[in-house]
Amino acid sequence: MSRIKEAFKDGKALIGFLTAGVPSAEDTLRYMEDLETAGADLIEIGVPFSDPVADGAVIMEADVQALKNKVHLPQVIEIVKAFRKQSETPLVFLTYYNPIFNYGVKKFFEEAKDIGLD
């Protein structure tokens, strides 16, 4: 059974969200651990993007802060790698196609699989 399916086995799941890089990359990892400890069944990680037109003001502001902190897709992947060493909590990204395209679509999906992104 997939980790996501397992998270929803009772018909509902508590999903925690954070934007990677806010207030810092190091804090992101700690906050992910805190979400897991607090009972999150799944963690959604926002990948910072410079033009998040489909998101609201809070996520837009968080993306701006994360980008000022120089957190981009490669850094988010490293955060997930570090978290995955200690946790099997399902992880998903909130992202746009642009960061994936710029990173390399094939490379992104290969790495996503390798790091255990769900």
Image (cartoon, rainbow, N blue to C red):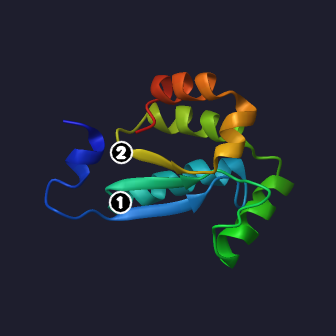
Which kind of residue does numbered mark 1 sit on? Answer: Ala
Image height of 101 relative to 55, above or below: above
Question: Are there few (<14), some (14-19), or many (20+) residues within 10 Å of tag 1?
Answer: many
Residue 56, by quadrant, is bottom right
Image height of 74 relative to 23, above or below: above
Q: Secondary structure at mark 1?
A: loop
Would residue 107 be seen by someone viewing this image from the given angle?
A: yes
Label 2 or label 1, whichever comes before in sequence order: 1
Image height of 72 relative to 111, above or below: below
The residue tagged 1 is: 40
> Which residue is found at the position 76% from the left and 56% from the top?
66
Q: Residues at badges 2 and 1 in contact (C-beta under 8 Å)?
A: yes
The residue tagged 2 is: 89
Separation of disc 2 and disc 1 at Cα?
8 Å
The answer to whether residue 77 is left or right of residue 32 is right
> Which residue is found at the position 86% from the left and 56% from the top?
68
The answer to whether residue 36 is left or right of residue 5 is right
> Which residue is found at the position 72% from the left and 69% from the top?
60
> Which residue is found at the position 66% from the left and 69% from the top?
59
Quarter that holds the C terminus: top left
Give coordinates of residue 26: x percent, y percent: 67, 48
Q: Secondary structure at mark 2?
A: loop
